[in-house]
Image: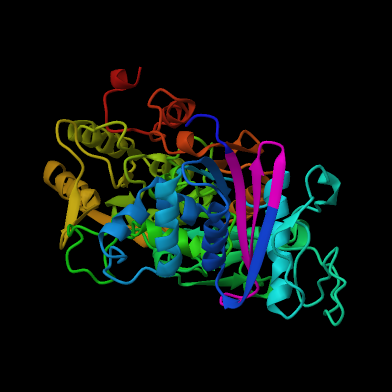
Amino acid sequence: MTKPEYDIYTDGACSGNPGPGGWAAVIMHGDKKEEISGYEKMTTNQRMELQAAVEALKQVPPGSKVRLHSDSAYLVNCFNQGWMTRWEKNGWLSAKGQPVENKDLWEQLAELTTKNKVEWIKVKGHSTDRLNQRCDQLAREAIVGAGGAENRENKTGYAGNEEACPGPDHYLSENYSTMNDKAPGSKTFSVNPKKRRIGLLTGGGDCPGLNAVIRAVVKSAGYSYHTEVVGFNDGFRGLVENNAGLIDDLAVSGILARGGTILGTSNRDNPFDYRPSGSPDYRDTGLDRSGDALKNLDNWGIECLVVIGGDGSLLLAHRFSELGVPVIGIPKTIDNDLPATDVTFGFDSAVTTATEAIDKIHTTAESHHRVMVVEVMGRDAGWIALHAGMAGGGDIILIPELPFDYSCIVDKINERNRWGKKFSIIVVAEGAYPAGTGPVYKTKGSMERLGGIGETVAREIEIRTDMESRATVLGHLQRGGSPTSYDRILATRFGFKAVELFSEGFCNRMVCLKGDKIDSVLLEKAVEGSKQVDPAGELVKAALAVGTSFGVPLEALS
């Protein structure tokens, strides 16, 4: 777009949703600046955002080049992603066949944007941009008009008076007083700091430490940054279905030591490929309901979405960031396979659970002179198996990074028998597999999940030796229970860092641990690739040094 003839900033505000609302716009044309605002006694925030854009564009002569700045991701994306065009062609019906809300305003916007060349630009809500701040102030002042005070429309004369703009730290509440409103009979209010608002959800599989992160986000947001937290229940499903509510300090009291997540989670709900709850076949084609998610974020007045999750959840978070939603990711997975952080919370707790199980299995293995196979989680990475196997004294550790050879496993078992050790412990990652084959999956309906390699290895051991063998699958035990002290501390540090990044204006990043320091990386970098065990790394070398076998010839590790 060539240099615009008009720069327009718009904003809307609503005291309750629905409730009294105000809209405002600042129109720049050369050296001239005009401010307009208005109100409705009962409305919604989205309607006020739309009203501001409509009224501002009405002030522009047809055929003008306009750059319209809005902090509403929903409004901007409706144009930049072509949603409004699709609605108009579909008779103002949504993808679900339902009437589009505020159809009257959308029709006016459609007409106004065909008369002018409009470039829509998303600005950060409550940013340091003075014009964005001024719009926010004017819209909130207009709410007083909805309550019966004088309505201040079509103001001019603000140009050059930058110091008069107080920025985002003024909130219209029951005690608000405008700077200039001295109209007889107007209500008297006082100034209170305005609370900002962030959204929070937990996605993917559960793990110990999720509640510790939620607690850290809510407490640090409230105590240190005067920010409210809206929690979306059941992961991205809650974001699409608007199943959400404010989380306060009382709600997170006592949850530090609790496993799971008080918000609930899901690893099957993709807003860009969304299926109704209880869909009989996950292979069915879903609907793109990202627009509903954006609308809900906008209606809640959320400035940034904090997503706690693993690679799948963070990939979805990144897709929302590409739509203009400010996002901060917090890495969660017991698998520890995210490359942008040294450690993910939940990993230490899972390793501790697996280690304790191996300790207990040792006693029955030794008593019955058996080979005991313990299958642990980890997907395509062997971090849990390696750490728990080393901590629990596993004799053989099988990981996906080193496809194994049964003959090497048998050689190790026979070697231990010659030394008088009549039992062996094998720790196998769920994604491990024999060389020349592939991982073992279990099928349930249309879903395939890793699992079954433990039983397969146990059967092969009995066939290839004269020793009795048993398999134990730890499964979801590794996801449950109270987080370790390490995970509680790491989760708390991650949660605080996320809020700190938001307060400093840094979004579209993922918090991470680098060495002993909490840092952050670009979200797009955080979802690149997978972190796997280095077969030539120090951990593997240490395990080999104490006699552990990885089911492969030693030359394969050199």
Q: Is residue 305 left or right of residue 368?
A: right
Vertical arrangement, residue 67 with respect to residue 143, above or below: above
Residue at image location 72% in from the left, 63% down from the top: 195
Vertical arrangement, residue 289 with respect to residue 190, above or below: above
Residue at image location 52% in from the left, 45% down from the top: 344
* Colouring scheme applied when the structure was drawn: rainbow
- What span is in magenta? 6-34
Camera-side residue of 465 and 472: 472
SS assignment for the magenta stretch, majority = strand
Q: Is residue 393 left or right of residue 379?
A: right
Image x and y of residue 466, in percent: 16, 46
Camera-side residue of 263 and 381: 263
**Residue 170 counted in the magenta span:** no
Specify the quadrant of the image occupied by residue 319.
top left
Image x and y of residue 415, in percent: 28, 33
Image x and y of residue 322, in percent: 44, 42
The number of numbered badges drawn on the structure is 0
Vertical arrangement, residue 390 with respect to residue 552, above or below: below
**Residue 28 counted in the magenta span:** yes
Residue at image location 29% in from the left, 52% down from the top: 369
In the image, farthest residue toward the front:
61
Q: Is residue 21 visible?
A: no
